[in-house]
Amino acid sequence: MRTDMHVQQGPAPGPEIWIRGPVALPEEPPPSPAAVAPRRFSWVGVHGGAGVSTLAAVYGGHDCGRAWPGPADPASVLLVARTHAAGLAAVRHALEVFRRGEAPRGLDLDAVVLVADAPGRLPRLLAEHVKAIESAVDVYRVPWVPAWRLGDPSGPPPREAAALARLTGRSR
């Protein structure tokens, strides 16, 4: 009887193949919504009376007033202005500061938040200024809220600002 014979079971093994490049790893499931921490951000008013304190009270986040966030503050910035001519001009100036790289290092401009300066629609000239700003950065609009004028930010965020509520994670 021969002892050097080898009986192979099943198909013969093929050549060993090496894959070049990154190998896809199994995808991890996305974290559950409850596991995602709320986003941290700083509200920065580009002019006095922009509404920073009210927005911080309603939506959370750090109230920087008219100052840039400090080193311990969230670096994610939401610029705030009223929708009157002076407010929109101040936004354009602040955007230019970011564009030229003159804002403090490490800050990220997330968006501009425009707070209605009066009830009703914007005049056409102001609406055109808003469109120009929207062409450069994400803009969130907040309508006129009579209770806020009276100093009561305790109610839910306005329905018309649902996108801002989603951004900030404060849909109360």
Image: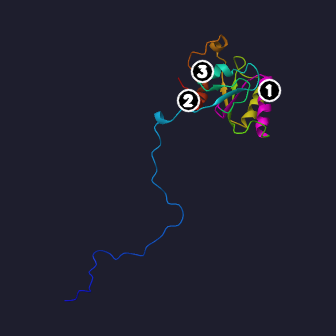
**Going by the image, does 31 lie left or right of 3?**
right
* Vertical comparison of 40 with 154: above or below: below
Q: CA distance from mark 1 to mark 3?
A: 29 Å
Front residue of 35/144: it is 35
Is there a contact, CB below 8 Å, between mark 1 and mark 3?
no
Front residue of 93/128: it is 93
SS class of the residue under badge 2? loop
Q: Which residue corresponds to the image point at 75% horizontal and 33% vertical from the top-left?
A: 133
**Going by the image, does 116 lie left or right of 154?**
right
Crowdedness near tag 2: few (<14), some (14–19) or many (≥20) residues, C-alpha within 10 Å: some
Identify the residue under disc 1: 125
**What's under tag 1, amino acid-wise?**
Leu
Say which label, 1 or 3, has the lower sequence index.
Answer: 3
**What's under tag 3, amino acid-wise?**
Val
Q: CA distance from mark 2 to mark 1?
A: 33 Å
Front residue of 29/67: it is 67
Crowdedness near tag 1: few (<14), some (14–19) or many (≥20) residues, C-alpha within 10 Å: few
Asked if the stretch drawn in magenta spans residue 30, the answer is no
- Name the spot of residue 129 as percent of width and height, x first: 78, 30
Colouring chosen for the image of the structure: rainbow
Q: Which residue corresponds to the image point at 47% horizontal and 40% vertical from the top-left?
A: 31
- Name the spot of residue 30 as percent of width and height, x first: 47, 43
Identify the residue under disc 3: 58
Say which label, 2 or 1, has the lower sequence index.
Answer: 1
Q: Quadrant of residue 80?
A: top right
The magenta-colored residue range is 72-99
Identify the residue under disc 2: 169
**What's under tag 2, amino acid-wise?**
Gly
SS class of the residue under badge 1? helix
- Name the spot of residue 16 as percent of width and height, x first: 43, 73
